[in-house]
Amino acid sequence: MEGIISIFHIDAKLLIAQFINFAIVFVVLYWFGLRKLGSYMKERSEKIKQGLNSADESKRLLAETEAASAAALAESRKEAKIILDKAHEDAQKYAIKSKALTDSEIAESLARANKEIEAKKSEILSQSKQSIITLAATMTRKTFAELGVSESSEVAKSAIAKIEAGK
């Protein structure tokens, strides 16, 4: 054993002093650095996890809102088709009644009827689309409010702007 100590020039007092210095440095670093760093990292990872969960929930709610908007739009289109069919039927009835009129009067009457039909169709589709957009925007705002997401956040602004733009 003495041979190893003399070969490697190991000094027991120096070895003990270095061990004590290392222990002191380790305790000081742990006490003032590593402990606080560990708690900060844990707190930060919790915030990131919460943010990711919130983003997933927002995406899910946006998809639900888009689905509801699509369903409402389909329903409005059905109603518009029914109204349009009735308008065509009324126009045909009117055309039958006006057969007794001269050719020029009939042509004028049909043109007016078609313009009225197109105007009603455009008006109904415009009103339906506007109602759906308003409904979707309101639902999105309420959803974000229930989630506690501010309307000034980027996700909320983007979703509401897309809905209000009619996309």
Image: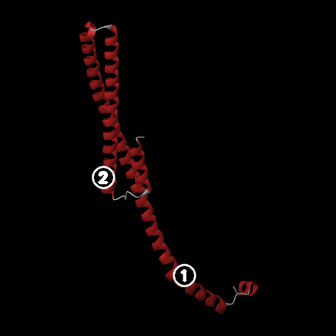
The N terminus appears in which quarter of the rendering? bottom right
Which of the labelled discs sits on residue 29, or is there none? 1
Q: Where does the image place residue 109, in percent across and percent down from the top left?
A: 31, 16
Q: Amino acid at mark 2?
A: Lys
Location of residue 92 by image quarter:
top left
Rendered view: 73 above or below 109 = below
- Measuring from the top left, give residue 118's x and y in whole percent: 35, 25
In this view, 33 is above or below 2: above
- Of the 4 image quadrants, the one containing the C terminus is top left
Of the residues under marks 2 and 1, which one precedes in the sequence? 1
Q: Secondary structure at mark 1?
A: helix
Quick one: 45 or 116, which is closer to the camera? 116
Q: CA distance from mark 2 to mark 1?
A: 50 Å
| Residue beneath the point at 33% across and 35% down | 73
The residue carrying mark 2 is: 142
- The amino acid sitting under disc 1 is Leu
